[in-house]
Image (cartoon, coloured by chain):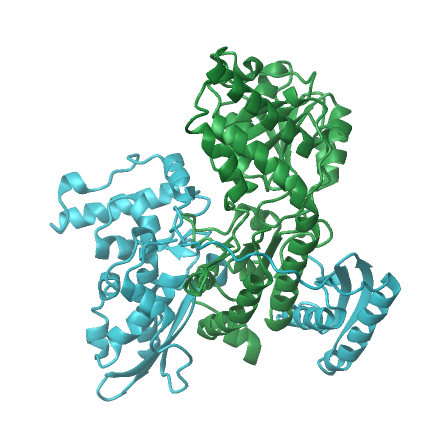
Chain colours: A green, B cyan
Amino acid sequence: MNAVYLDNNATTRVDPLVVEAMLPFFSEQFGNPSSIHSFGASVGAAVKTARAQLQSLLGAAHDHEIIYTSGGTEADNTAILSALEALPDRNEIVTSKVEHPAVLALCQHLEKIGRAKVHYIGVDALGRIDIEAYRAALSDKVAVVSLMWANNETGTIFPIEGLADLAKEHGALFHTDAVQAVGKVPISLKDSAIDMLSLSGHKLHAPKGIGALYVKRGARFKPLLRGGHQERGRRAGTENTPGVVALGKAAELAALHMADEQTRVKGLRDRLEGALLQRIPNCFVNGDLNDRLPNTCNIAFEYVEGEGILLHLTRAGIAASSGSACTSGSLEPSHVLRAMNIPFTAAHGSIRFSLSRDNVPEDVDRVIEVMPGILEKLRELSPFWSNADKSGKEFKPVYA
Amino acid sequence: MWDYTDKVKDYFFNPKNAGVLSEANAVGEVGAIACGDALKLMLNVDPTTQIILDAKFQTFGCGSAIASSSALTELVIGKTLDEALKITNQDIADFLGGLPPEKMHCSVMGYEALQSAVANFRGEVWKDDHEEGALVCKCFGVDEGMIERAIKMNKLTSVEQVTDYTKAGGGCLTCFDKLEEILSRANAELVAEGILADHEAYRVGAADPKKLKEKAKAAKAQAPIEISPLKPSSPIPPPSAGLTNLQRIRLIEEVIEELRPYLRKDGGDCELVDVDGSNVLVNLSGACVGCQMSSVTISGIQERLIAKLGTTVRVVPVGRNAH
């Protein structure tokens, strides 16, 4: 029985065509793209082609607006630190409570060392950003706004272009962590006010260890890594050429598969979600149903703990992930679900299924087949469930 | 995921003694849903011999919480109350071939439930009745007595261990000073009793709370799952033709009309307020307001709507019942 992989927001399988494209750059095409001799020149050309492929996926005006990085985290860190350095008379950051740790942990650190004042904008129960709070936080003291395009846990999409326009009114630089959005939703940077955008290779069927930061031409920028003149002096260090070529190929394929993602993959997601909601009592979708990534489904199952569900799914050969506390080192549910004020009765039992173009109908059908039984079994064990379901009496634990 | 022993996995997947014990005459309940785990232990004790004839449990929690609860029931059946009271949380962990350090609180929960059940049988009040001020960790509802017992029974000598065994300090960590104080006091007592060497004892100020918090947040590496190549894609039929907005709203109204008699029977009511894309906004009124069962009602309406519409919708309560 094949394993069913529904954890594509964590990482994706490298596309075989991507592997094929990158392999020569480990062997015969080993040259340093900065070298003048023939070994370097052909590799330099491949790096340039890859840049154009990425430019096309992002709808960027110029290929040199793309800076290769080691991944999404480096891109996020570079963007925020660059903005603070480039705009020395501004020391505030505006971000949200539901960002990826690559942004949140950095902001918390900058706050701690007294480098910046940070505004963490909240979200509503559907994960939608509080626009009024966002407007109120903007001022001419803000150096950079950093907001995610799509949330990794719930798939909720922020109205990024509009948020960027608002930031521009105050002269702040606008950065978006688009790690989950790139390849899944159409992006046209040349028509937007977005100054910087982060992306990661391994979320779009390229390998780990490669990513990129888009920096709009004319946007003020200070490098994080200094050294050689690679990437026009904006990111020193010899290029990870196999990774760069892989990212280019992955970008080309992502553009080709975008329609599939929006229709077939979305269809599979909807089929999975609809069937689970219909067959399992007391569960609901976390996130904004109206504006959500086509591949992501995050369902809160009340009165059960997520780890138990994942253990059963793993045994059934299905890979998913959980926003519950027990599966990580933390004792509290995910910061995203807490920011959304998902009740404790449900936050501990939230499961994320994230699909990709690799998935087939049989995959979701396997989940639909096993999930009702798993939930029934775990709920039978739960002291809350029997009370909520049958007698209606409230459970009164000793340590309430 | 966690590195659980085969015995933990076995007791999770095939728990023994799960469910309600109708003839229970001793019940112990610990934990709360907000904290992420809770256990209800039910015992049937022979009043003359004091022997535990049967035991069952219901647990909300992770794999190790369920396994620990089941292990506890296996350990106590056939024992007299006095024998059972000698069982420590370490005995529960040992029975399972060990627990990951961060999951030791699951075994402590079992120990506490047993103490509570025995007290319940004997008509005593289990001493953690949360008198004003006794609660130390507000995030996870842990009181001083439980922390002290866990420290002494397991010879804990760091705040980190206290969090692993009781969950206290696993959230906001504002109780850090109090935890330090309890730990150093309990350790000093253990030193006085000759159980702990003086140099092992914890002293206030030895730990950095920020470091602990960072560590607590660091996610554990996931165990690899074997992935074989995926099958080639096969075409699936296109989604059925969409309904117009008006048709959708009519269908939604129909469903609510169908369910209304049931709600009215219980003194409640429900009306459609608006349809915003996939969000169906409803106003629950009458007895539905503030009812513990309203989430069940919402869930029921949602199920019917999805079945009828064939697409995913989310029923959102608004109006007076909204938070």
B79 and A96: which is toward the camera: A96
Tell me which residue sits at (33%, 58%) in the image.
Answer: B146
Rendering coords of residue B164 (x, y %): 33, 51
Residue at the farthest bottom position: B48
Identify the residue at the far right of this view: B246
Q: Position of residue A122 (x, y in %)?
A: 65, 42
- Where residue B40 sits, quadrant-wise, is bottom left
Q: Does A347 sit left or right of B222 as displayed?
A: right
In the rendered view, does A396 fall on the left or right side of B144? right
Res B183 visible: yes
Residue A321 vs residue B59, the one in the foreground: A321
Of residues A328 and A321, the one nearer the viewer is A321
Residue B136, position as x, y percentages in the image: 40, 51
In the image, residue B51 lies at what x, y percent? 23, 83
Q: What residue do we see at 46% from left, 28% from top?
A: A25
Residue placed most toward the observer, B145 or B43: B43
Q: Is residue A236 visible?
A: no
In the rendered image, the vertical position of residue B48 relative to residue A290, given as above or below: below
The quarter of the picture where the N terminus of chain A appears is bottom left
